[in-house]
Image (cartoon, rainbow, N blue to C red):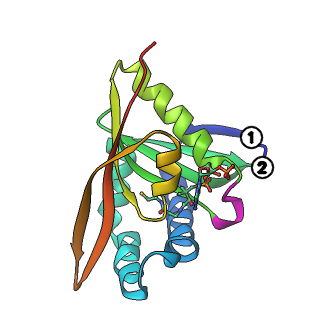
Amino acid sequence: MEISHIREANSEDTGRLIEVFSNSIKTAAVKDYTPNEIKEWLKTTQNKSRWRDLLKEQVVLVAEVRNQVVGFASLKEGNYLDFMYVHSDFMRQGIAQCLLNEVLDRVKSLKMESISSDVSITAKPFFEKNGFKVVRKNENHRGEEVLINYHMTCEVPTA
Ligand SMILES: CC(C)(COP(=O)(O)OP(=O)(O)OC[C@H]1O[C@@H](n2cnc3c(N)ncnc32)[C@H](O)[C@@H]1OP(=O)(O)O)[C@@H](O)C(=O)NCCC(=O)NCCS
């Protein structure tokens, strides 16, 4: 898959970020979470301040193919990976890998020695492949549901 480029997101991307987020949960995460858990997770799409703050407070990187945003990742406070979502039409084509490589370059340029994230059951194999290790299992209470994810960290070689 040819990614035209990875660039920083701007406020005009918000609608597409929400579309990609929503699509990836409905198509991929649906295999690992119950319908009610998915419903709770998707409530984030209605949280306008979450998306506004995301663009204000984090470095958000988008991957584009033919000028279309097909995935995005975000870096909070230098070395916490908050979002990593890829549209279903573009999964398993190396998009998340390209985004993570760019994120890791940013972490290295800040001279930080590790990166962490709270990773869905669905995304765990991707992060394990990239050397991330589980530190703890999280139980996130959302409404009546308990969504499981994993706090994972990875050392970032500085050389
Ligand atoms: C997890 C996710 C971001 C991966 O995106 P992607 O662009 O498909 O991943 P890549 O193509 O870059 O994968 C690179 C490698 O990671 C591993 N990998 C990725 N997805 C995997 C999966 N579902 N199962 C097993 N290994 C996987 C594979 O080794 C893959 O290489 P390969 O395809 O040559 O075997 C994507 O599946 C997604 O958006 N999932 C739903 C949303 C989600 O849970 N996001 C994370 C929230 S923390």
Position in image of residue 55 (x %, y %)? 40, 47
The image quadrant of residue 59 is top left
Instruction: State the SS at label 2.
Output: loop
Ligand 1 near label 1 (Cβ, under 8 Å)?
no
The quarter of the picture showing ligand 1:
bottom right
The image quadrant of residue 142 is bottom left
Q: Which residue is mark 1?
A: 4
State how far apart marks 1 and 2 are (Cα). 6 Å
The image quadrant of residue 34 is bottom left
The answer to whether residue 18 is magenta is: no
Residue at image x 33%, y 63%? 149
Q: Is residue 148 above or below residue 123?
A: below
- Residue span colored magenta: 88-92
Q: Main secondary structure of the magenta part?
A: helix
Amino acid carrying mark 2 in the image: Arg
Q: Single out the residue that lies furthest toward the top.
A: 159
Q: Which residue is mark 2?
A: 66
In this rendering, position of residue 32 left or right of residue 49 = right
Q: Callout 1: 10 Å neighbours few (<14), some, many (20+)?
A: few
Q: Is residue 76 above or below residue 70?
A: above
Badge 1 vs badge 2, beta-carbon distance below 8 Å? yes
Q: Callout 2: 10 Å neighbours few (<14), some, many (20+)?
A: few
The answer, for residue 10, to whether it is visible in the render is: no
Q: Is residue 131 above or below residue 22?
A: above
